[in-house]
Image: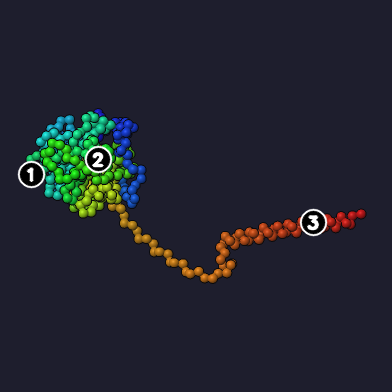
Amino acid sequence: MLQRIGGGLAVVAVVVGVAAGPAAGYAPSEGPSAAASTGPSVAGTPVCTISDPQVTEVSGLAATADGYVVINDSNIDRTRTRIMFLDASCKLVRSVAYPTSAFDPEDLAVAKDGTVWVADVGDNTTATGGSGNRRSTIALWSLAPQASAPVIHRLVYPDGKPRDAEALLISGDGTPVIVTKDPAGEVYVPDGPLPSNNAAGFKLKQVGKFVTQATGTANPLGILGQGVVTGAAVSPDGKRAVVRTMSDAYEFDVTDGDVTAAITTGTPRITPLPNEPQGEAIAYTLDGRNFLTASDQPKPVAILKYTPFVPPKPTPSAAPAAAPAPAKDQSFLDSLSLRDVTWIVTGFLVLGVLLIAVGVFGVRRSRAARRAQLTP
C-alpha cells in the first residue's frame, strides 16, 4: 500500500523518494522484452461495488464459489484488519479476525484445497509514507476451510534486510511465492517446509526477478506506477499466472505448476488496467476467463472485470519466391543494365561533343593560317 496524505496518494513522497534513491527501483525497463505484446487500453467493467464501511482499503482479492474473499491492509485501528467474505453482489457475509495483530496484509490467494493464504508482507519506506520503523520479519497467514482463525508463518529475507512487498502466488505444489515492490520484482520462496506459529523468521530464498515494462498505461503515478508491483494471482487450473502493477496485468503461461519459472523467465501478455484509483488487487474469475481487480480506497470501490489480452495469431507467411533460373551464357550487351547503358550513351555523347569541338578548332586554325599566307 502507498500511504495516503490527507486522503490522496502520497505522490509527492514517492517522487521525493525517487530523487533520494529508495523508490528508484520502481522505474520499469525502457523497452519491452523480446516478443512481449501489449493489448489495447480498455477500462474494466464494473461487477459490483463494495460499499460496506467495514470493507475499505482492499489490497487482496480472490473469487470463490459463493462470491469473493478480500483483505484490507494496514488500518490505524488494527481490529478492523480482517479476512472478509463477500457474496456475489459484494455484500459482506462474514469476517475472520487475526489472532494477533496483522501488520500490513497486502495480498491473498486461495490454494487448491480451499486454504486462504494472506501475505502480511507490506513494509513501506518513509519515501512511500511509512513510519521508518521497518519490520524484522514478515508473515504468511493460512486460513483452512472452516477454521475460526488463521495460523501465522513468520519469514525473513535471506540477507535480513527489510523489503516492501504486495504480491503473492501459490505454485502448483502449494509453495507460496512472494514478489517484492521495493526493491522491485524480487521473487522469493520459503527455503524449505514452512513452519507454523514460529517466533523467529524462517528464511526465504530468492529464485529470480520479475521485470516490468514502460507501457505508457495511464495511472495515478505515471511511469512510476508502471513499475510498482501490487498484486498477483494464479488461474484456477494452474496453467496461467498474472502479476500486476498499478497500471497493467502481466500474464504468463505456467508449465508443470512452476510459477516462479513462468514469471521470471516467461514472455508476458500485457493487459492494460487504465486509470484505476490505486490498483492493488487482482484475481481470476472461477472459470479463468477474466481478471478481477480492486483498488485500495477508503471509500466504496468497484470490483472490475477485464478480458486478458490474447495476441492475434501470426498471419501465414507469403509463399517463398521461386529460385532464380540458372544463368545462361550472355553476350556483353545482354549483361548490361539500364544504368550501364545510360552511362555508356552519356560517355559517347560527351566524347562526340569533344571531337566536334576539336574539329571546329582545327578548321578555324587552318583557315586562319591560309589567310595569313595570302596577305601581302
Q: Residue at x 34, y 50 (%)?
A: 34
SS of the residue at dot 1? loop
Q: Dot 1 corresponds to which residue?
A: 146
How many labels, in total? 3
Extreme residue toward the front, this view:
159
Of the 4 image quadrants, the one containing the C terminus is: bottom right
Question: What residue lies at 62% left-to-right and 61% top-to-bottom?
Answer: 344
The local crowd at label 1, few if under 14, some if 14 to 19, many if 20 or more residues have their Cα within 10 Å, is few
Q: Position of residue 29 (x, y in %)?
A: 34, 43
Q: Is residue 263 left or right of residue 151?
A: right
Image height of 311 relative to 56, above or below? below
Residue at position x 14%, y 40% from top?
153
Where residue 307 sits in the image (x, y, percent)?
A: 25, 49
Q: Label 2 to label 3, Cα distance in Å?
A: 96 Å
Q: Nearer the viewer, residue 188 or 105?
A: 188
- Where does residue 133 sit, x and y in percent of width and height? 21, 30
Q: Amino acid at mark 2?
A: Thr
Tell me the number on the disc at residue 364.
3
From where the camera sits, is residue 71 visible? no
